[in-house]
Structures are given as structure tokens and as C-alpha cells.
Amino acid sequence: MHQALVEKQKKYPSGKSQRLAKQKAYEKQARKKKIGLDKLCVFTQQLSSMLDAGLPLVSALDALQDQTTDPVFQIIIRNVKTDVSSGTAFSAATQKYPNAFPNLFTSMVAAGEASGALGSILGKVAVYFEDSVKLTRKVKGAMTYPLAVIGLAIGLVQVLLIFVIPVFAEMFASFDQELPKPTQWLIQTSDFLKANILYLIAGLVGLLFILRKLLQTPKGKVVWDHLLFRIPVVGMLVQKVALSRFCRTYAILLRSGVPILKSVEIVSNASGNSFIEDACRDINRHISQGGQLSEVVATKPYFPPTIRHMTRAGEQTGNVEGMMNKIADFYDDEIKVAVESLTSLMEPLLICFLGIVIGSIVMAMFLPIFNLAGAVAN
């Protein structure tokens, strides 16, 4: 009977056992899971407000742990709170979770701890994260519509080829005449797709998997960035997003008291662009030898003249971070205009594309009927 009870518990675990199993699963994910920038932004804003209001760091983390709805992030905050309670610096505690807290966050927290203005520094980080989230949403919003239309076109073509064309093919088989070339090609394509649809899906999934792995390699990332940069309109948008992120990140790090070389290193890691990473390596090497940022920027074709001149002006006036913020604001406005232009340009082009694709298939299906009607009339 006892054995039967054990087997039953294994098959139908109790509510407590299920909770413990979920807790263990969340604990394993805590070291690996990447926390979304929007969640991290809310966390940083709330933590900054609590610290500015005079709440101790441990109490603020305890409150945020209760407020967080993400169970994995909740465990991360709990573990960070435990480390801070035991005497570990907040920056050192967050460094244990690099996927949740990026290098920029931990470095600025360290700067805030050193200066005694952690709440104020976190407020700047929160504003930076909020600007980054808005920028990302703008770009994603611009790409959603064209991707949705292309997906709709592909879906409609698949439905027509797999389900509609075979019906017409059976009807055309009774015609005592040769079918037009477009109709023959369409029927052959339909037959091929029906016979190999599973292989095609498997091949597509495999190809996407391989491409994803290749893009994670340094060389693959460089090739991808070069390709993106050369695409008309899109390349310009990608460049402006990267430059805005570079300037904004560098400015907030300098303003928060992070050392210049450390700031450049963080900018390189946060850029997500091989051009910026290459430039940051040269900037770090040049500055460590006593040079200036503007001298390296002037040698990189990826940086337009505006950045070169304003960076040099910032160095001459001793206000590099202020100039960097102005450049970032300028590019944010440029990105907004570029996104609106891209959206307005893509709409008519995609509608034409959808009409041509579907219209061509419909015409190819009805050509034999038109030919037959013409032959009967003659």
C-alpha cells in the first residue's frame, strides 16, 4: 500500500511538491535568464525613488521583490538582497547575474556607491533605459507592418498553392488543349509543394538555426552588420540607432563618474554593432596612450562629420558628455523621421507587392478558362 501511495504521488504530485519543483526550476534559470529592458527600467525607477525617499537599500529590495511578478526576477532580487544584507556591495551582488543586470548597470551602481549618490545615479540609469526602450519600440514598430504584410502574402500563397490550385488542376485535366505556360508552372509548383512541404519546413528551420549560430560568431556578426549597413534606407536607420546608443551611453557613464576607459569598454559591449566595437577598441587604445576621442572618431568613416566636430568642440570646452547628449538627441529625432518615412514608403510598395503576387496567381488560374471561352466563341 505504501508503494502504491509513493507511485501515486510521483504520478500526481501534491501542490506543495509542484511549488517546490517550480521553485527549483526558477532557481536554475536565475543565473541564465535575460531580464527584459522594460522590466529592468521599472525596477531601476522604483529603486531610485525609494532610495531618494530615504528607504534603506535592503528594505527597498525587499519591497521590489514582493512587487515583481516575474518569478525568476523575484528570485534574483531575493538573492541580491541576501548578499547585500550579509555585507556585499550592491554592485558586486548584481555582477553575479550578468544576464539580468548589464555591465552598464553594475558599473554605474559602483560609481553611485563610491560617490554616495546611488539613488541619483539609478535615476539617470532609469532615464537611459527608458530612452532605450522607446527607441527600440520605434524601430520594431516600423518593421512590424512590413513583416506582417509579407507574412500574410506568404500565407495566402501557401493556401492557394496547396488547397486551391489542385482543384483547378483537376478541372483543367478535362480540357482537351494545352495549358498556358504560367498555369503549367503554377500547377507544377503546387504539386512540388504538396509533396515536399514537410521537408521544406524542416530545411527552413534548420537554415534559420544555422544562421542564428553563425550570427553569434564574431565573423558572422561583422558580415551581418556590413550587409545591414548596405541596405538602402534600412542601413541608414541602423547606423543612426547605433550612433545614438553610442553617444547616449558614453554621456551617461561620463556624467556618473565612471572612468573614461571603463566607459569606452562598456559602450563597446552595449553597442551591439561591430563598427562601434571596432571603434571602441581603437578609442580605448588611443586614450590609454594619452590621445583624445575626437582623434579616433575622425579616422572612422562610420562616424559622420557632425559627430567628429561636436566631439572635438566638447573636448575643447570640457563638456564631452553634454555634446554627446546633444548628438544623441539629434539622432533620436532623425530616427523618428526615418521611421516615419520608411513606414510611409513601405505601405504602398507592400500593397503593390501583395497585389502583384496574388493577382499573378489568380490570372494564371483563369487563363485556361479565358482561352477556352475564346475558342468556343470562335
Image (cartoon, rainbow, N blue to C red):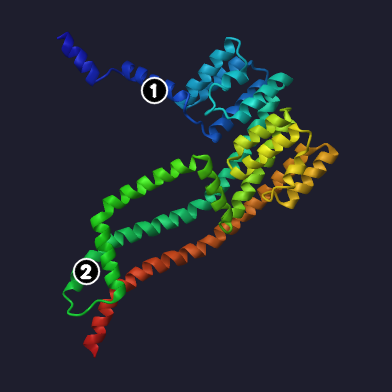
Name of the residue lying farthest toward the bottom: 378
The foreground one among 4 and 301 is: 301
Compared with 22, 150 (above or below) is below
Which quarter of the rendering shows the C terminus? bottom left
What is the number of the mark on residue 25?
1
The residues bearing labels 2 and 1 have C-alpha atoms spaced at a distance of: 54 Å
Residue 163 at what x, y percent from top left?
Answer: 25, 60
Give the amino acid at mark 1: Ala
Name of the residue lying farthest toward the right: 317
Left or right? Give the position of 368 relative to 92. Answer: left
Compared with 373, 314 (above or below) is above
Residue 151 at what x, y percent from top left?
Answer: 40, 55
Give the amino acid at mark 2: Ala
Name of the residue lying farthest toward the left: 1
Crowd rating for badge 1 (residues with CA inside 10 Å; few <14, some 14–19, many 20+): few
Judge whether residue 45 can be spotted in this image: no
The residue to which callout 2 is attached is: 169
Residue 256 at what x, y percent from top left?
Answer: 72, 29
Compared with 374, 357 (above or below) is above
Residue 254 at what x, y percent from top left?
Answer: 73, 32
The foreground one among 28 and 369 is: 28
Compared with 151, 53 (above or below) is above
Q: Residue at (55%, 62%) from the top-left corner?
A: 345
Which quarter of the rendering shows the N terminus? top left
Q: Residue at (80%, 44%) from the top-left corner?
A: 312
Mark toward the start of the polypeptide (2 vs 1) = 1
Crowd rating for badge 2 (residues with CA inside 10 Å; few <14, some 14–19, many 20+): some
Quadrant in the picture for residue 180 = bottom left
The foreground one among 268 and 330 is: 268
Q: Residue at (26%, 55%) from the top-left corner?
A: 196
Total marks in image:
2
Left or right? Give the position of 238 relative to 320. Answer: left
